[in-house]
Image: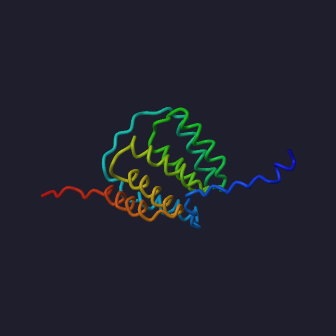
Amino acid sequence: AFALAGCAQPVAPVKQDVKPVVAVDPAAAVRAIRAAGAGLDSAVQVHPLRDPSIDGFLDNAHKAEASNNVAEAIAQADKALKLAPDAPDILQYRAELEIARSQWLPAERLAIRSFTLGPKIGALCARNWQTVVEARIAMNDPATTAQARLRVKECRVAPRLRM
């Protein structure tokens, strides 16, 4: 048996078609995401009343993030998501926390889910698509990055001309 084992050919490693991740500063990416939505909240948005504990969890998450404790911010945001699993704003915030810890693909998935459930224009929309931009830059995917940049621009709708 040992003699036959010595004659066996080693199996060639299987090549994986994985694109290299580009070095990206996660903090700069989060700033770019939040800047994309700045100044776009002029539209009227209707939000349902929600459990006050959700806002408590989100306040705790923001405090933890400000203290550079991303793990605790994620834990608090996840508690809020358990109570409101389809809240687009919480999903987007959670995506931004994933960006902060360089988890590009989960961040993109959360942002797309937030976009699907949320408004298709305005600040949240712009943050959703800028998240995709930042994730795709990090994943070295220029074609999808370009498409996502166009989608960010589509979130900006000019106000109606009033006379």
To which quarter of the image does residue 16 belong?
bottom right
Residue depicted at 55% across the width and 58% down the height: 17
Residue depicted at 38% across the width and 38% down the height: 47
Q: Is residue 26 above or below residue 110?
A: below
- Give the image location of residue 130, x and y in percent: 44, 58
* 48 left or right of 73 in image: left
Which sits in the foreground, 41 or 145? 145
Number of numbered discs overlaid on the protein picture: 0
* 154 left or right of 17 in image: left
Which sits in the foreground, 135 or 99? 135
- Give the image location of residue 86, x and y in percent: 46, 36
- Give the image location of residue 104, x and y in percent: 55, 55
Quadrant containing the C terminus is bottom left
Quadrant containing the N terminus is top right
Q: Is residue 53 above or below residue 106?
A: above
- Give the image location of residue 28, x and y in percent: 54, 65
